[in-house]
Image (cartoon, rainbow, N blue to C red):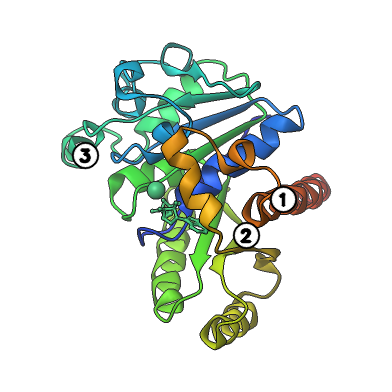
Amino acid sequence: MTRIISIVNQKGGVGKTTTAVNLATALAAIGKQVLLIDLDPQGNASTGLGITPDLRKITSYDILIGSKTVPQAQQKTEIPNLSVIPSTIDLSGAEIELVNLPQREYRLRQTLQSCEVNYDYVLIDCPPSLGLVTINALTSAQSVFIPLQCEFYALEGLSHLLKTIKLVQRQMNNSLDILGVVLTMYDKRNKLTEHIEEDVRGFLGDLVFQTTIPRNVRMSEAPSFGKPALIYDMRCRGSQAYLQLAKELLKREIERAKKLNNAA
Ligand SMILES: Nc1ncnc2c1ncn2[C@@H]1O[C@H](COP(=O)(O)OP(=O)(O)O)[C@@H](O)[C@H]1O
Ligand SMILES: [Mg+2]
């Protein structure tokens, strides 16, 4: 079964796209077939994977509205096993257009279910909002993955996000679960980081991944070369952390599958 994971946080600049691109790359590198859907009109994941604007003919807007299928919209990246459905600024109109469409919360899910999707993993990079586009990502996914930046307002934003996830679970997608939270741009010399980590781990327990992603300038350089950090500089601390994160994620995937099997 294809695992569909939405990478969500309504705050911008917390590391969603960096996480989506590098996790997708790490999973592809170990031989998984991976599709990354760029669901942010800013198109940063598309850029980060080297998809220049002239290559964005069929986009995530089309699969969200339902005018194109996944096989029509997917395109290969330079990374073996990794495909992408890019986005353009057109997607910013979708938030309003969706309002008047039937089944507006489920459009993406309908497209994903409408034909066979031959991937092990579909990662969805969400926009920085909890509007209808993100709701579509949440109704499409089995799991949510939350990058959280260690800063003062992190917990406040998180409780709002968790409320939204609960609402979606209750009303629209009862098989949705939270795969985990990863602390990003982590700076262990910073006292505040330490406090926030304690709070978040105290509040969420095992949901928080052991792996943290350090702040590392190589991570922010990579997108301008149209490459995931993992390809741009595999040895840097950030890339190594994302490899570690992918390993931890796969371990959780096995535990999750076991739990679901036992429950069935
Ligand atoms: N671990 C990191 N170290 C340094 N810079 C990072 C790191 N992760 C992300 N960034 C940079 O921070 C900015 C926001 O990250 P991004 O992944 O685009 O967040 P989001 O998708 O949540 O808006 C980008 O410029 C990105 O290159
Ligand atoms: Mg982003």
Front-lying residue, 177 or 193 = 193
Residue occupying image coordinates x 60% and y 64%: 214
Residue occupying image coordinates x 30% and y 28%: 61
- Residue 256 in the image, given as x and y percentages of width and height: 75, 50
Tag 1: amino acid = Leu
Marks 2,1: beta carbons within 8 A: yes
Q: Quadrant of residue 142?
A: top right
Give the vertical position of 114 relative to 34 (above or below).
above
Cα–Cα span, label 2 and label 3: 28 Å
Q: Secondary structure at mark 1?
A: helix
**In the rendered image, is residue 7 in sight?**
no
Residue occupying image coordinates x 43% and y 42%: 137
Residue occupying image coordinates x 65% and y 68%: 208
Cα–Cα span, label 1 and label 3: 31 Å
Tag 3: amino acid = Ser
Whichever of callouts 2 and 3 sits on the residue coming sooner in the sequence is: 3
Q: Quadrant of residue 3?
A: top right
- Residue 207 in the image, given as x and y percentages of width and height: 66, 66
Disc ID at residue 180:
2
Disc ID at residue 92:
3
Give the vertical position of 157 relative to 216 (above or below).
below
Task: Name the residue tied to disc 1.
Answer: 249
Cα–Cα span, label 2 and label 1: 9 Å
**Disc 3: CA contacts within 10 A as few (<14), some (14-19) or many (>=20):** some
Q: Is residue 234 left or right of residue 38?
A: right
Whichever of callouts 1 and 3 sits on the residue coming sooner in the sequence is: 3
Whichever of callouts 2 and 1 sits on the residue coming sooner in the sequence is: 2
How many numbered marks does the figure carry? 3
The C terminus: image quadrant: top right
Q: Is residue 12 left or right of residue 249?
A: left
**Disc 1: CA contacts within 10 A as few (<14), some (14-19) or many (>=20):** some
